[in-house]
Amino acid sequence: MDLTALPTQSSDNHPYSKPYNIAVPSASASISNAISEPVSTDVDSVNAEARTQTIEPNAIILAEALTDKAIIWRIHNCKISKKTVTQDLPLPFLYHYDSLDDNIKQTYPLTPPLLAQFNHPMTADEAAKLIGIDKALIASPWHVKIIGSLVVFSEALQLAVRLHWTNTGKETEQIYTKDEADALIAAFKDWQFFGRVDVLYKNDKQALISIDEHAEGNNQILTINASADYQFLPATHALAVIAELEADKGELPWFETAILERLA
């Protein structure tokens, strides 16, 4: 199946991001349609072997390829797996009190009973009652936590990589805005990649390797053999790939564009 013929709508009728052409290398045979519905293999069947010998001159280094702007990378199947956007979750009392205007704090200073509630979770309405003020004087922040995934692929390299993303590593991010749409935009100013990394590699003519510079001995270099199925990287190599992506993320705008389009 030619990747250029992939459907332009995902299963829930949200468009995935448009292809982003950075350069025009020659194309090779297409990746199979396993890119759309990947089946991850068990770690023992990744078929990636550690080695210490010299890296082949024409080998593809996974992290370097993913951040190479001279390669045509396209985004497919950007989707959300978990979404929390609400104003109804409780916060420790101190968060509510700190959000008050200074003149209100001067009028309603902290008393021993209020200090005793500092770490007690409560809603903005409950905090207002505790302080003795109108609930309109306490802003209710948006609690935002969104987790998703996307597939980035290169037709020329016959390589697809499934990555996971989120707006925060915390339970939720608290955003003080009036509108939900503005809260989503603000929450994703510091989005990040995280978690497992799955690789689909169909080219048996060229070696694909992953390098973990912090590992020692035989664990530093991993050769990822061509396969019809997705293979997930060992945790240390996934972290190495994510670290490289995070370092160069500002120069790889197609990722953020795909995510923001998916949130719209």
Image (spheres, rainbow, N blue to C red):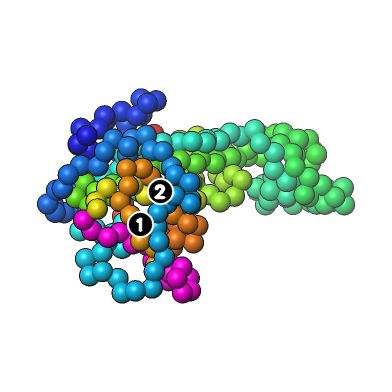
The picture places residue 137, in percent across and down from the top left corner, at 67, 38
Front residue (pair 66, 145): 66
The picture places residue 230, in percent across and down from the top left corner, at 38, 44
Horizontally, is 146 left or right of 2 in the view? right
Is 215 within the magenta? Answer: yes
Front residue (pair 222, 77): 222
Residue depicted at 14% across the width and 48% down the height? 27
The picture places residue 261, in percent across and down from the top left corner, at 35, 37
Q: Is residue 188 visible?
A: no
- Residue marked by disc 2: 231
> Which image quadrant for residue 11?
top left
Q: Which residues are magenta?
A: 205-220
Q: Is residue 121 visible?
A: yes
Residue depicted at 26% across the width and 64% down the height? 59
**Given contact means CB atoms under 8 Å apart, are the residues at marks 1 and 2 in contact?**
yes
Q: Distance of mark 1 from mark 2, alpha carbons?
A: 8 Å
The C terminus appears in which quarter of the rendering? top left
Front residue (pair 69, 131): 69
The picture places residue 104, in percent across and down from the top left corner, at 71, 47
Residue depicted at 44% across the width and 54% down the height? 233
Residue depicted at 65% across the width and 47% down the height? 99
Q: The disc labelled 2 sits on which kind of residue?
A: Gln
Q: Residues within 10 Å of mark 2 (few under 14, many from 20)?
A: many
Front residue (pair 241, 88): 241
Is 106 within the magenta? Answer: no
Q: The disc labelled 1 sits on which kind of residue?
A: Ile
Horizontally, is 99 left or right of 25 in the view? right
Mark 2: which secondary structure?
strand
**Residue most extreme to the right:** 112
- Residue marked by disc 1: 224
